[in-house]
Image (cartoon, rainbow, N blue to C red):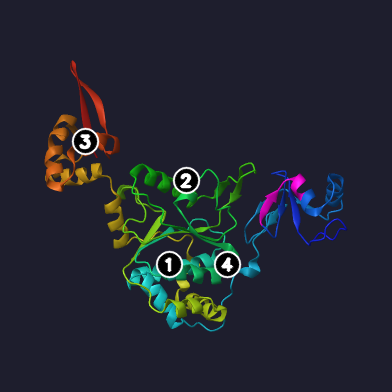
Amino acid sequence: MLETPKSCAKETYIYIKMLCKYYWVEKRSFFTTAEVCSNLMCSMKDLIEMRKEWTIRSFDNICYSLKDVPWHLNLLDERDILKPSEDPILDDNIKYLIENVCWYKQENIDYLHRAILYKHDNIDDFTLPCIVLYWKGWSWKWTLMSLLATIFWESNVLTNLWQRELQSSFDTYKWQKLVVEFAEVTSNNTNIDKAILNRLKNIVWAQKLTVNEKNVKPYQIENSAWFFVSSNSNSPLKLDDKEKWNRRFSIIKSNFSLENWEIINKKVKDRETVRNYLAWLYYSFPEVYEYKKLPALDNQDKRELEDRSQEEANTFWEWYLEKFPDNKWKKIRHTEINDLIPTFCDESGTDQWEFQKYFWRNSRYQKTKMRLWKETFYWVEIL
């Protein structure tokens, strides 16, 4: 703490050499030399003296981790993370919340319990799949975030970021969080939704994040966040086509509203109740201790969302291979494919003009030139 005559407020400033900036710890923000002088009502000479006297400490860089990194200012306080109690008790309200969020599907329920336990046991792990929660509203997603805020501490949880935060040039999420939730990120515009998916893929499973704050040069930081996407829409996120597996995402759909959410929200904020829940997790899912990594949930919810996300061009290929299964692993002239498009559009109720406009651009199988004797044709190799 600064205890100088020039400072009437007790403020903790740290100098970060990599960024040539001062960091105000209490406000979690960077400041220039002039701004710190103004805040502390001191001269630049006085500020330099405070650094020399170690009143203002200097670090090479910053980090956010349970493990200490030499010469880095570590802004994660382990004491903020809730510890399990000695009583493994699953409160009925927490049980109801998790089951309701997971639509009472046992595989989803067990997965969400295990995921919470895994993150609690592996705070620094950046490889957790992003959990996409969608369909019904009425407070259950917000209540689940309240439970996570009790476990990981409110200042370590950032909720209700929107689509604009994934499109902005500057980052609202600035790394110093353990849980980050984006809400309602789809736009119903294919190009925008693809860009949003790609932006999410750049931060989910990223070992390092490049942070771009206003008035601070871009810097990299170790990633330790667990990401969520929540939505009341039936299309919460435009996933890649199913052939790409979408390993970064676990999908959980719910079709029930949460009743008595005020009582439940009060319970998930009660630290002793949640400490008992953590103890119950450690008691009920001991296999999680042995996990090297938490895999994505492979369930029907995910397959349904992948089907809805799939490009119409690739829906055509599924239709085509159903009709002509013997053509797999063959080369087919692209004119034969074009001749079948009107039939597909007629059977699927698809606008043919719009479909043909983007078909080859989005197609899973691309047409390529092939020379046969003196003629050149376009062919498609169906793998």
Is residue 324 at least partly visible in the picture? no
| Relative vertical location of residue 102 with respect to residue 9 in this rendering, above or below | below
Q: Which residue lies under the disc numbered 2?
A: 167
Three-letter amino acid code at disc 3? Gln
What is the C-alpha distance between the residues marked 2 and 4? 25 Å
First of labels 4, 1 by sequence position: 1
Q: Are marks 1 and 2 in contact (CB under 8 Å)?
A: no
Check disc 3 and report its element: helix, strand or loop. Answer: helix
In the image, residue 254 lies at what x, y percent?
33, 67
In the image, taking residue 204 as reference, residue 238 lies left or right, namely left
Label 2 packing within 10 angstroms: few (<14), some (14-19), many (20+): some
What is the C-alpha distance between the residues marked 2 and 3? 29 Å
Three-letter amino acid code at disc 4? Glu
| Relative vertical location of residue 184 with respect to residue 269 in this rendering, above or below | above
- Of circles 2 and 4, the one toward us is 2
| Relative vertical location of residue 323 with respect to residue 13 in this rendering, above or below | above
Q: Which residue lies under the disc numbered 1?
A: 141
First of labels 2, 3 by sequence position: 2
Q: Residue at x 69, y 44 (%)?
A: 19
